[in-house]
Amino acid sequence: MSRRGRAAVPLLLLLLMCYFVPCSTSKEQERDQAAQSSRLLRESLRAEAEGRLNDAIALAAKMPQDVFAVFRQGKLMMKKGDFRAAHAAFSAVEQVQEMKASIAYCLKALQVSPLDLRANSILKRILRAPGPFPLEVQEVQRQSQNAILQSHLRGGFVHQHERMQSKVTDISYNGKQVRLVSSANSLYFQCLANLVGSIQLREPNLNITIYDMGFDELESMVVSDWKNVQLVRFPFESYPPHVRNLRNYAWKPLVYREALMRDSMILYQDAGQELWQPVGLIEDIIARDGYFFVMQGEKTLPEKIHPASMQFLGFEANDLRGKDMCAGGIQGYMNTSRAVQEVLGSTIKCALDEDCIAPKKADQSNHRFDQAIFSMFMSRHLYRLRSVDFTITVDNLPRCHCSWIFRAYLETARLKEADVFDVRDGFGHFYPLLFSRRCGSNQSYFPIFRHM
């Protein structure tokens, strides 16, 4: 292998190392250590996203000190500006460059969890190189792919008992031309895997675009390997500096604009969502209305809109009372729709000005950022309330599409509360198309790779 190829191997390994545990421990201990390492990684990523670099470094230092943990500390030290410490960390990482060591790490991780998407993707890439490779390596990789495929095919099993208890009607059918779009960074990588797995299962022929909001090299490699998925790096450099702060959500309407420059019809889903049925009905609504907006399931206008944003845009609190908060993370558009101009375009203009999208002292307790701005502009224009058969206009109030099967955040605990039909099983007459896990539950769906 060339020096260039050998140097690239660690970059394919780096995030895998958080799963590596000593061989001498029992399987139970290995799983516990892997879970603890994963938890520490998630906390470290969250601390980094919130700008708490010292906390992020301290959490990375508590992880098992394998190659990945040392590399992560080096990245954080570099970000902090401690270049001497960063250089020492990167020098330590360079000691592991052999393909033999890479394979050993992959095998160890897959023995602990055959569903490790990162390890499977790395081993698949390694096996593409000129061999021969030991039969054990090929067999472990084959078993892992089979485990992922079987988990994918029984996707949604966590909720099947709820569906079996419900006397519901399936109303959905496959979409044909809509492009499914989502976005994520390292913190939401596992949630994104769950979403993509659900889309691949319910809509196996539709294409998916994922916007990279901050993946590392390995995560980018894994996402690029998923079937029907196109990974697109979000062009932060094309926008004002405040857009890089993902906590103010200024980036989300910009993702919609970027996607509509590529495709004529899109359906955006937050990474924490799941698809429970095909999207043909939603595609028909987008084609008919030019947009797809759904209720958040709460009437929090204007309480969850910062007064400075209302003042900036010329809205009065009394004009918004009693109107629905519409979801910022579930939206569909035709790029020729008036809604692109009246709602999305106006929201983008606000998102590009930090004083509008994220005024001082705004946080989740008093402001819903992009969602608040979307909802204000939806309330200004007559985005009508439609029934689920989308043939009857219930009224001309400025609301989103009304059916609860589309509502944004229907966690299991809220299904009965959200059921507008008030039936005992909690689902009503129609089974929901969309569901939100908020990334807090165990993964229910698994994505499949190309050529599986």
Image (spheres, rainbow, N blue to C red):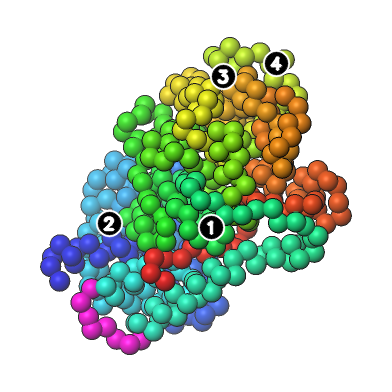
Helix, strand or loop for disc 2: helix
- Residue 147 visible? The answer is yes
Disc 2 residue type (three-letter): Ala
Q: Residue 152 at x, y = what percent? A: 54, 68
Furthest-left residue in view? 2
Please name the residue that numbered disc 3 is placed on. 309
The disc, 3 or 4, on the residue closer to the chain's N-terminal end is: 3
Q: Which residue shows up at 57% across the image and 59% down it? A: 202
- Residue 362 visible? The answer is no
Q: Which residues are magenta?
A: 129-136
How far is the residue under mark 1 from the one under mark 3?
Answer: 39 Å
The disc, 2 or 3, on the residue closer to the chain's N-terminal end is: 2
The disc, 1 or 3, on the residue closer to the chain's N-terminal end is: 1
Q: Which residue shows up at 27% across the image and 83% down it? A: 133
Tag in front: 1 or 3: 1
How far is the residue under mark 2 from the one under mark 4?
Answer: 57 Å
Mark 4, Cα crowd under 10 Å, few <14 / some 14-19 / many 20+, is few
Helix, strand or loop for disc 4: helix
Q: Nearer the viewer, residue 1 or 418?
A: 418
- Check residue 45 for magenta coloring: no
Mark 2, Cα crowd under 10 Å, few <14 / some 14-19 / many 20+, is many
Tag in front: 4 or 1: 1
Q: Residue 8 at x, y = what percent? A: 22, 62
The quarter of the picture where residue 407 lies is top right
Which dot marks residue 169?
Answer: none
How far is the residue under mark 4 from the one under mark 1?
Answer: 40 Å
Please name the residue that numbered disc 1 is placed on. 203
